[in-house]
């Protein structure tokens, strides 16, 4: 974390001074705003957290609940989510209170006595090849708390307005604030507010979605589950491990140990649900769910002492055909005003544990794009890439969930090999951990022409970290962990062996009128306010002198124009990033988007290609 460059900071540096709309922010919901986020769950609150770093944009977030969520339904956080927490600055804190899982265990019927279960495959979860971040268990409410804290501490000082129920919306492009939204306020009185953009994060029964022509694709089949968080005594040996447990005849359990050391969540399958048995299955009591759990766990026992949360729900695979309000026949000619995210877009089973994780990535994707457009950095056409990118990911999620749920639901005799479930999970570990996402070419994702220059940084996928040495203080650092969710693009210049090409690139980026840094950085702003550039040399840090580093990688910051010396790195011999990430020894430029995805890989000699790429989505800031 960097601070003091605007003057000495005597208070907690995580609490930013108010700027823009954060200076005179009122508690009351105003009549007009730039962005209205409907729903303060994971998909909505991450948007507030991102947009707090765009303080000139008036952002409001509402929720129908009277106050903060106290008990969340979701709890499993995959590695990509942990990486996201790192970007928002609270991973270490949330990890300290979380339950960390290292393995996943699969249990199934004994071959010689299928009435009893036995442990089968153990799998590393996630595999170390996928991410250095773990799988952790934290109550959803705490995730929301951390994002809400970040949003309130940020420059825009964003806080949820609770007790507001969304009723309907209409759009009129002739108005300065085109989207008119009807609400019920906390007093039960109807009022109308206007916004430039609305994002519906209001769940599977989204009222925002219902006000648009967005259609849902629904799987005709549905499955019922009882889910209970319990304090219990059990003889089951893996109660503090994540487990998939399959019995011979009585169904399956997904077991998730919760934070705190004693609490455990049991997802207990109740079977397929339809109109003929819905009322019966919905009426299942926790006692009946515990009885079924005991049958599945046989010969082990479960003695429930206290149920802290219990619900019966049905899961039907659904995915919206698009994630914004642009009619299909106007895609490409009309810019969106209304978006949906999270459960409003897609629902799926608990077995893949993806709901909250994917919802946060939905929210982050649209938030930074709204920020860029509303600050005048990008054309509104950028917003069309949200639906184009995230709808495809939702389709892939549903396909994975169907395959995984189908595998978990098979009876033992239907498997060619009892080890198939574990192998499927291991072979597909990248997907649930959030790293299989790969966005196609678009205005913010380049073509793969030069991918061979940095094979370990796949264009369209999340940036994979690696150990490096920071030259100024010689400290070892994970390069990917230095990313901050501040809305800036990242330029990683991996130097050539004799450092000539990287020096010439730095000179051009800093001084050429054709450089995107000159074109797209507002006049009078710090040179690193839009593009955060880092250089990584092949040589050990002992052979790199800061006096020889191009000035572009030593940017001046703040009113005193103090030199930032923390952007210069060298390969660490113990884990050479050039070898680990298969980066050409001729060097490469890796461009990263504000949501951590790799936007492009280009040679250090590129010039027009760099400017042309950014010109696809950015507006010149030069008068």
Image (tube, rainbow, N blue to C red):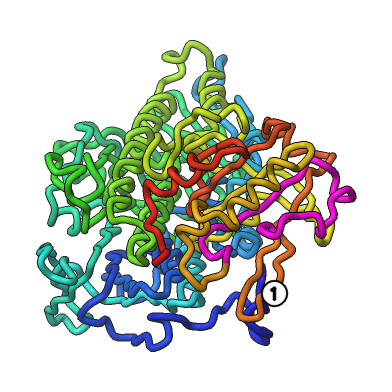
Could you tell me which secondary element the residue under label 1 belongs to? strand
Percent across and percent down for residue 471 are 81, 55
In this rendering, the answer to whether 269 lies above or below 482 is above
Q: Residue furthest top?
A: 416
Question: Which residue is rendered at x = 22% and y = 39% of the image?
Answer: 321
Q: Can residue 538 be found in the magenta stretch?
A: yes
Return the residue nearer the eye: 245 or 91: 91
Displayed quadrant of residue 566: bottom right
Percent across and percent down for residue 311 are 34, 53
Question: Which residue is rendered at x = 84% and y = 39% of the image?
Answer: 574
Q: Residue furthest front?
A: 513
Span highlighted in magenta in the image: 527-553
Question: Which residue is rendered at x = 70% and y = 60% of the image?
Answer: 551
In this rendering, the answer to whether 52 lies above or below 435 is below
Question: Which residue is rendered at x = 53% and y = 13% of the image?
Answer: 417
Q: Is residue 167 visible?
A: yes
| Local crowd size for mark 1, using a 10 Å CA cut-off: few (<14), some (14–19), many (≥20) | some
Q: Quadrant of the N terminus?
A: bottom right
Q: Which residue is mark 1?
A: 562
Return the residue nearer the eye: 82 or 549: 549
Q: Quadrant of the C terminus?
A: bottom left
Q: Is residue 434 visible?
A: no
Return the residue nearer the eye: 460 or 623: 623
Give the mark count.
1
Q: Can residue 443 be found in the magenta stretch?
A: no
Position of residue 528 in the picture relative to residue 414 (left or right): right
Position of residue 265 in the picture relative to residue 225 (left or right): right
Percent across and percent down for residue 392 are 33, 36
Q: Residue furthest right?
A: 542
Displayed quadrant of residue 494: top right
Percent across and percent down for residue 453 are 62, 30
């Amino acid at each position: 974390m960097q601070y003091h460059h605007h003057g000495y900071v005597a208070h907690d540096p995580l609490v930013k001074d108010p700027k823009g709309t954060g200076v005179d922010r009122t508690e009351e919901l105003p009549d007009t705003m730039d962005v209205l986020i409907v729903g303060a769950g994971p998909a909505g609150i991450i948007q507030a957290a991102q947009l707090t770093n765009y303080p000139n944009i008036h952002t409001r977030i509402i929720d129908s609940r009277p106050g903060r969520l106290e008990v969340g339904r979701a709890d499993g956080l995959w590695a990509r989510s942990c990486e996201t927490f790192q970007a928002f600055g609270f991973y270490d804190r949330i990890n300290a209170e979380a339950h960390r899982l290292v393995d996943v265990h699969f249990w199934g019927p004994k071959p010689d006595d299928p009435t009893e279960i036995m442990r089968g495959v153990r799998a590393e979860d996630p595999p170390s090849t996928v991410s250095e971040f773990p799988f952790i268990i934290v109550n959803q409410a705490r995730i929301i708390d951390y994002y809400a804290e970040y949003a309130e501490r940020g420059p825009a000082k964003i806080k949820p307005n609770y007790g507001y129920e969304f009723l309907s919306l209409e759009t009129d492009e002739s108005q300065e604030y085109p989207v008119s939204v009807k609400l019920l306020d906390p007093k039960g009185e109807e009022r109308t507010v206007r916004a430039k953009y609305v994002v519906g994060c209001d769940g599977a029964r989204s009222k925002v979605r219902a006000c648009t022509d967005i259609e849902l694709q629904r799987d005709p089949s549905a499955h019922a589950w009882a889910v209970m968080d319990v304090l219990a005594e059990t003889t089951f040996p893996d109660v503090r491990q994540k487990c998939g447990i399959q019995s011979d005849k009585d169904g399956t359990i997904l077991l998730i140990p919760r934070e705190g050391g004693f609490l455990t969540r049991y997802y207990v399958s109740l079977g397929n649900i339809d109109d003929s048995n819905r009322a019966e299955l919905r009426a299942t009591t926790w006692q009946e769910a515990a009885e079924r759990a005991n049958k599945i766990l046989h010969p082990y026992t479960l003695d429930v002492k206290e149920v802290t949360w219990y619900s019966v729900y049905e899961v039907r695979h659904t995915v919206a055909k698009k994630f914004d309000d642009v009619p299909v026949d106007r895609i490409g000619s009309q810019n969106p005003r209304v978006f949906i995210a999270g459960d409003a877009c897609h629902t799926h089973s608990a077995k893949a544990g993806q709901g909250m994780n994917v919802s946060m990535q939905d929210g982050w994707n649209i938030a930074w794009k709204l920020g860029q457009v509303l600050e005048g950095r990008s054309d509104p056409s950028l917003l069309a890439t949200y639906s184009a990118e995230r709808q495809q990911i939702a389709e892939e999620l549903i396909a994975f969930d169907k395959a995984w749920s189908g595998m978990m639901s098979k009876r033992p005799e239907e498997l060619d090999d009892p080890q198939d479930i574990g192998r499927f999970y291991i072979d597909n570990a990248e997907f649930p951990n959030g790293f299989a996402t790969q966005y196609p070419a678009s205005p913010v994702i380049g073509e793969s022409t030069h991918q061979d220059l940095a094979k370990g940084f796949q264009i369209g996928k999340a940036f994979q970290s690696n150990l490096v040495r920071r030259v100024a203080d010689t400290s070892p650092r994970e390069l990917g962990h230095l990313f901050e969710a501040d809305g800036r693009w990242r330029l990683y210049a991996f130097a050539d062996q004799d450092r000539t090409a990287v020096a010439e690139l730095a000179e051009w980026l800093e001084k050429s009128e054709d450089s995107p840094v000159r074109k797209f950085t507002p006049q009078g702003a710090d040179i690193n306010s839009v593009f955060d550039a880092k250089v990584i040399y092949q040589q050990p840090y002992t052979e790199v002198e800061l006096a020889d580093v191009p000035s572009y990688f030593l940017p001046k910051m703040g009113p005193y124009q103090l030199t930032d010396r923390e952007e210069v790195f060298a390969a660490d011999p113990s884990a050479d990033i050039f070898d680990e990430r298969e980066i050409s020894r001729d060097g490469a430029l890796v461009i990263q988007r504000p949501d951590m995805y790799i936007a492009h890989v280009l040679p250090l000699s590129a010039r027009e290609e760099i400017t042309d790429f950014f010109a696809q989505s950015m507006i010149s800031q030069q008068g």
